[in-house]
Image (tube, rainbow, N blue to C red):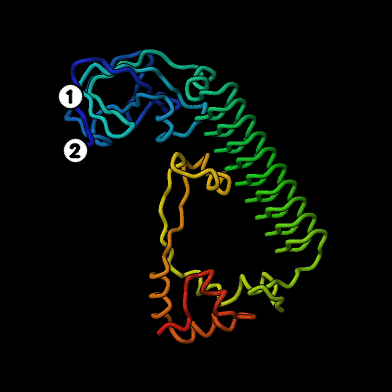
């Protein structure tokens, strides 16, 4: 028996168990109601009859399928417990739980057909918002998953009314937009049909500034550049900060922390990045310094790297 397992013999333990449509589980035939006993040495996932103390935990091991049977059970024998799963040698099946009742048990919200919802009227799972058919939404009326905004048919939007994915703005049919009403992608402006625009009503990508001066590069050129690829490997020193320890400014800058419980704060890593620069291949240094309008002073101010240091 491992240190994660606990053996109990004194008190009966109530729980829940899921069965196949024919009332079998792991090849063993059960009846409801019924009492069952096995003369074995308990072994989690090896020997014994398994159940969970919480109904919702059962569906970590079974599909959330109305065709299956779910029953209240009581263990009267020895029990070993690992994580959210228990195993016993004496089990009584008390009664089957109707599906409508089960939905109320596994959700803390109302009117849900999914599981693990604290919000109401969700057909998806693990939603704290309401009326979602997707999963893990903190917002409302989402048909996909991972949205903290409302009325999204895409995924992982913190904005509202988006058909695309990963938008923090609203009414976007594209993806990764922080602006609004964009049919393109990666726009911080509004009503753009192109990509990577910080302006409004554009159909063509614009040239961008480098080092405070105009350049002949678009943002797409930058995204696809070798310089960006090299710089993305620059080390960062990160510290996870709990929500309770975040400043008001950090909370405003990282609203997602309300959901995640915190964020990764970037610490001062001047010494680390300069060591990284010293070890960088000369051709890679040249690639970075060949960026449009390269300015040593600005580069040091932003990255902490002194390109002239020996």
Looking at the rendered structure, which numbered label has been put on residue 2? Answer: 2
Q: Name the residue that disc number 1 marks.
A: 39
Q: Position of residue 141 (x, y in %)?
A: 67, 34
Q: Is residue 182 left or right of residue 65?
A: right
Mark 2–mark 1 Cα distance, whole angstroms, equals: 21 Å
Location of residue 13 with respect to 239 vertically, above or below: above
Location of residue 219 with respect to 185 vertically, above or below: below
Answer whether residue 187 is visible to the viewer in this image. Answer: yes
Q: Which residue is drawn at 36% across and 13% down?
A: 94
Q: Position of residue 130 (x, y in %)?
A: 62, 29
Q: In which quarter of the image is residue 145?
A: top right
Q: In this view, does 116 lie to the left or right of 134?
A: left
Q: Position of residue 253 (x, y in %)?
A: 57, 49
Answer whether residue 256 is visible to the viewer in this image. Answer: no
The residue nearer to you, when weighing 171 against 280, is 280
Q: Quadrant of residue 52?
A: top left
Q: Residue at x 55, y 77 (%)?
A: 297
Element on which disc 1 rests: loop
> Are the residues tagged 2 and 1 within 8 Å (C-beta)?
no
The residue nearer to you, when weighing 91 against 162, is 162
Q: Residue at x 20, y 30 (%)?
A: 42
């Amino acid at each position: 028996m491992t240190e994660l397992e606990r053996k109990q013999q004194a008190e009966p333990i109530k729980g829940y168990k899921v069965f196949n449509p024919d009332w079998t589980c792991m090849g063993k035939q059960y009846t409801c109601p019924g009492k069952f006993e096995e003369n074995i040495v308990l072994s989690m996932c090896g020997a014994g009859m398994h159940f969970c103390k919480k109904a919702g935990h059962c569906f970590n091991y079974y599909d959330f399928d109305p065709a299956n049977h779910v029953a209240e059970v009581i263990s009267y024998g020895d029990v070993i417990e690992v994580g959210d799963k228990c195993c016993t040698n004496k089990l009584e099946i008390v009664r089957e739980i109707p599906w409508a009742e089960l939905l109320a048990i596994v959700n803390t919200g109302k009117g849900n057909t999914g599981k693990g919802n604290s919000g109401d009227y969700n057909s998806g799972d693990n939603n704290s918002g309401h009326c979602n058919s997707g999963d893990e939404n903190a917002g409302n009326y989402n048909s996909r998953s991972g949205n903290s905004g409302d009325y999204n048919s895409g995924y992982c939007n913190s904005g509202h009314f988006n058909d695309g994915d990963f938008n923090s703005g609203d009414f976007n049919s594209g993806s990764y937009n922080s602006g609004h009403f964009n049919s393109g992608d990666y726009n911080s402006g509004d009503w753009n049909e192109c990509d990577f625009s910080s302006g409004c009503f554009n159909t063509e990508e614009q040239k961008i500034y480098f080092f405070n001066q105009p350049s002949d590069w678009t943002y797409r050129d930058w995204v696809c550049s070798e310089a960006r690829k090299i710089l993305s490997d620059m080390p960062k020193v990160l510290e996870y900060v709990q929500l309770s320890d975040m400043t008001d400014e950090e909370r405003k800058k990282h609203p997602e922390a309300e959901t995640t419980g915190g964020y990764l704060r970037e610490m001062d890593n001047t010494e680390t990045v300069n060591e990284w620069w010293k070890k960088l291949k000369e051709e890679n240094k040249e690639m970075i310094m060949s960026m449009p309008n390269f300015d040593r002073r600005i580069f040091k101010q932003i990255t902490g790297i002194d390109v002239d240091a020996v």
